[in-house]
Amino acid sequence: MPLSRRQFLLAASIAPFSAGLATSASAATTHEVSIEGFAFSPASLSIAAGDTVTFTNNDAAPHTATAQSAGLDTGTLNSGDSESLTFNTPGTFAYRCRFHPAMRGTVTVT
């Protein structure tokens, strides 16, 4: 059934407003960090507040991503395991593997 002129004008006047609302809200992004060859890849990551980082262990050995300061810990990730952490607070978060302290990385949140 075709729209009346009034319905068409109303729909046309609302469409630009609702389209602006949809594009003004930024969606959170999920970033990937692979654990492979006893290293985090990428070792440094810059993300926006509210974004999520998924750590995936692609090594045979267990690993963690544990902050040097409190608040960030994936727990033990066995081979093939993943854990996602959401970063809501701006700052730079240094982390390492509890089992292999030479493995280090940073997440910078803006």
Image: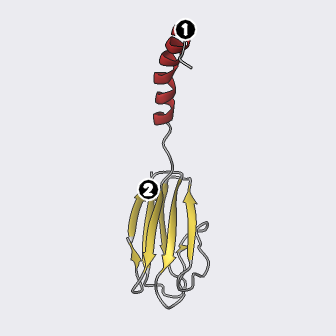
Residue at (51, 14) in percent of width and height: 8
In depth, the one of 1 and 110 nearer the eye is 1
Question: Identity of the amino acid at label 2?
Answer: Ile
Compared to 103, does 15 lie above or below? above
- Label 2 Cα crowd, 10 Å radius (few <14 / some 14-19 / many 20+): some
x, y percentage for residue 30? 49, 59
x, y percentage for residue 96? 49, 77
Compared to 16, does 53 lie above or below? below
Question: Identity of the amino acid at label 1?
Answer: Arg
Q: Quadrant of the N terminus?
A: top right
Residue 6's label in the rendered image is 1
Its colouring scheme is: secondary structure
Q: Secondary structure at mark 2?
A: strand
Residue at (48, 42) in percent of width and height: 26
Residue at (56, 53) in percent of width and height: 88
x, y percentage for residue 3? 54, 16
Q: Secondary structure at mark 1?
A: helix
User: Which residue is the site of mark 2?
Assistant: 47
Compared to 91, does 78 lie above or below? below
Residue at (62, 77) in percent of width and height: 75
